[in-house]
Amino acid sequence: MDSGVIELTRNEIHDFFSVGRASYTRPVPLWDKATGEVASFSSNFTFQIRPESETNQVQLRDRCKGDDMAFFLSPYPSKPPNSYGKNLALFNDSNNISTTGDDRVVAVEFDTVLGDFDASNSRVGIDVNSIKSKAYTNVTRSMVTDDAIMAAEISYDAETGVLAARLQMEGDEPYNVKWTVDMTTALPQDVAVGFSAATGMCIELHQVLSWSFTSTLDRAGTSSRWRRLVDVIVSSAVVAFVALLCAVAVILVRRRRMWQRLHDSDDEEHEQAEFERGVGPRRYRYGELAAATKDFADEEKLERGDFGNVYRGSLSDQDRPVAIKMLFMESSAQGRREFDSEVKIISRLRHRNLVQLLGWSDSRRGLLLVYELVSEGSLD
């Protein structure tokens, strides 16, 4: 490189069979196997293909031209041996018809010499793993000049798979050529991107004056991997957070249910204790109530209701007669639970129009309720 100019071949009159390459310093991502993403890219550059330096006192009309220059993509890094002359510093005589493996290459060549597989000595062609161009367009005048600066644009559209080349020479209409290339089969995932040129027995100078290259995967490939990693991390974090919330919810529900069971149990034990301590209605023995009613004698029976018989009785702890109701209920566990429930409900009621519940008995021989006796009242 001299003064910002990339010199691909040597500027010496007797230095035959010169090859040169200039490429980006790092591998460029072309496609991503993990995601299937293929890069779209665009490259713009200006260049000259010049005859030997005027200091060598050689006239253009008196000399031969050779050989060619190319923009290329190939495995990184690679430079096949014996790639001088017509081989563009990309091929050699053993593989220039069909390349495989690390010798693969996709190139846009700028021909200045008629080769074995060339249709003309001035053309732009697209090569895919072969020096024999898949497509080309002829250039109507020589690209080897002392002063003409040429501009080229090479682009690849990953959506359509079209590789397109455009050459602009001053005073001419643009020269265009394109070809469909599957980059995933033509080249590896990471490639070298740059320029190559070669000379044989004839000499010319290949100079790149300016160059820009952009790629959707070159800049976004690495970040897309980070994005995928971030997506995985975020997704995992969300799943973990949701799982944590579910676990916390299950624990809270279980604790609430446990607390409710304990609370209900405490309430039941408290109420049972109050029952049995005589706070509110007291618990009587069956024998006490049987004695109070003369063993439930018929002469003490006050009425027969739908749910049981009512008897008059006298209890030592009451200063007035009481009404004792013997319920028609079975002495089963279910009957006992229903009886307890009724007793608790009735014992909590306080109203001037309601008969006061004084006590109860839940003997296996009967379930009984003790009320204060109200004249002309009913316990049904």
Image: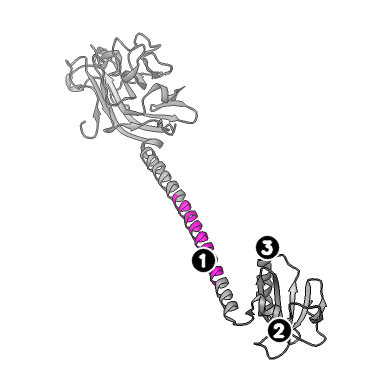
Which mark is in front, 3 or 1? 3
Which residue is located at x 80 percent, y 88 percent? 375
Which SS class for mark 1?
A: helix
Q: Which residues are magenta?
A: 240-266
- How many numbered callouts? 3
Question: What secondary structure prevails in the magenta region?
Answer: helix
Magenta span has 241? yes
The secondary structure type at the circle numbered 2 is: loop
- Label for residue 259? 1
* Left-right relation of 221 to 320: left
Q: Please name the amino acid that badge 1 sits on.
A: Trp
Amino acid at dot 3 = Ser
Where does the N terminus fall, quadrant-wise?
top left
User: How far apart, in angstroms, are the residues tagged by discs 2 and 3?
Assistant: 27 Å
- Check the image and report above or below for 66 versus 243: above
Q: Which mark is residue 332?
A: 3
Q: Which residue is mark 2?
A: 356
Count neighbours of disc 3 (C-alpha within 10 A) and say few if under 14, some if 14 to 19, many if 20 or more. few
Residue at left offset 71%, top offset 84%: 356
Whether label 1 touches label 2, CB < 8 Å? no
Q: Position of residue 46 (x, y in %)?
A: 33, 30
Residue 215 visible to an observer of this rendering: no
